[in-house]
Amino acid sequence: MSYSSFALYYDSLTQNVGYPARAEYLIHLLDRMNHKAGLALDLACGTGSFTIELAKRGIDIYGIDSSESMLSVAKQKAADNGLDIFFLHQQMQSIDLYGTVDTVFCMLDSINHLTRESDVMKTFSRVSLFLNPGGFFVFDMNTLYKHRCVLGNQTFVYDTDDVYCVWQNCFEERNSIVGITLDFFGRDGEVYRRSSEHFYERAYDTELIVSMLSKAGLETVGLFRELSFEKPDDQTERIVVVARKG
């Protein structure tokens, strides 16, 4: 999907993400794995916030996303930061790069947006294809615990200077999918104009993910709680997965 409405307000609604701290964490993570980032790819880069933060820290990186609207914002943000970053418009499960890379990042539950196992498998296979031997694939995922107990059938309201947003979730226990509906009320002079987005996220069992990575030729070398180097537990909301190509 295009995420055209979401792209307009994505940065306003994710101000609490803390991209600089997350970029520092990723750098420390690679150091812990004794891996040099080399040429890197930010897969499902969205509006490019991670891409930009990593580029600021000296990583040679470019971005891919399926949303032209998101990429338009990313390109402008990179230019505003004086950075020459290359962005490509491609689907995760069918990336076709100009050459191989040393590191692939895929952050902020982008893998959860793939609701079919076959698409996850395709994505892992394409990542493996374009990773150099010894290359690393680092991604994170929302857990079933988060889908069931945090997102669930909840409604959240965000009121920022740019937009008033109503976020409604509908959790399907049978397949661990959360249906997400976002209603945006963007300020336009003295009035607000409404737009909407609807998409799904699926939580995957960690053992299944590890198995699919293995089938794609990627060895799982680390599973961590978000922004830490501790092992996940049954109340972890987001897991960081580190895989290496042999």
Image: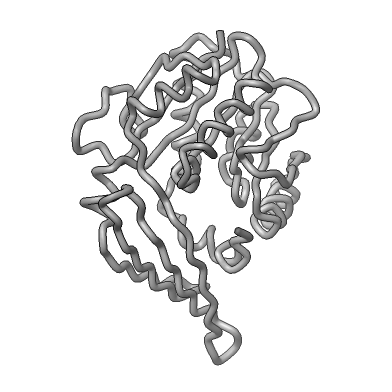
Q: Is 111 situated left or right of 74 in this image?
A: left
Closer to the camera in the image, 117 or 8: 117
Residue 166, x across and y down, in percent: 39, 73
In the rendered view of the protein, which quadrant contains the C terminus?
top right
Quadrant of the image occupied by residue 225: top left
Residue at (58% x, 46% y) in the render: 49
Where 55 sits versus 181, above or below?
A: above
Q: Is residue 174 left or right of residue 8?
A: left
Q: Quadrant of the N terminus?
A: bottom right
- Residue name at image x 35 percent, y 43 percent: 203
The image position of residue 135, as x and y in percent, is: 59, 15
Q: Nearer the viewer, residue 134 or 56?
A: 134
In the picture shown, does residue 112 fall above or below 15?
above
Where residue 65 appears, as percent x and y from the top left, is 65, 46
x then y, percent, for residue 159: 40, 73
Tally of marks? 0
Horizontal placement of 27 versus 132: left or right? left
Residue at the image position 36 percent from the left and 52 percent from the top: 177
Q: Residue at x 62, y 46 (%)?
A: 48
Specify how the rendered protein is coloured: one colour
- Report the residue that reaches farthest toward the bottom: 190
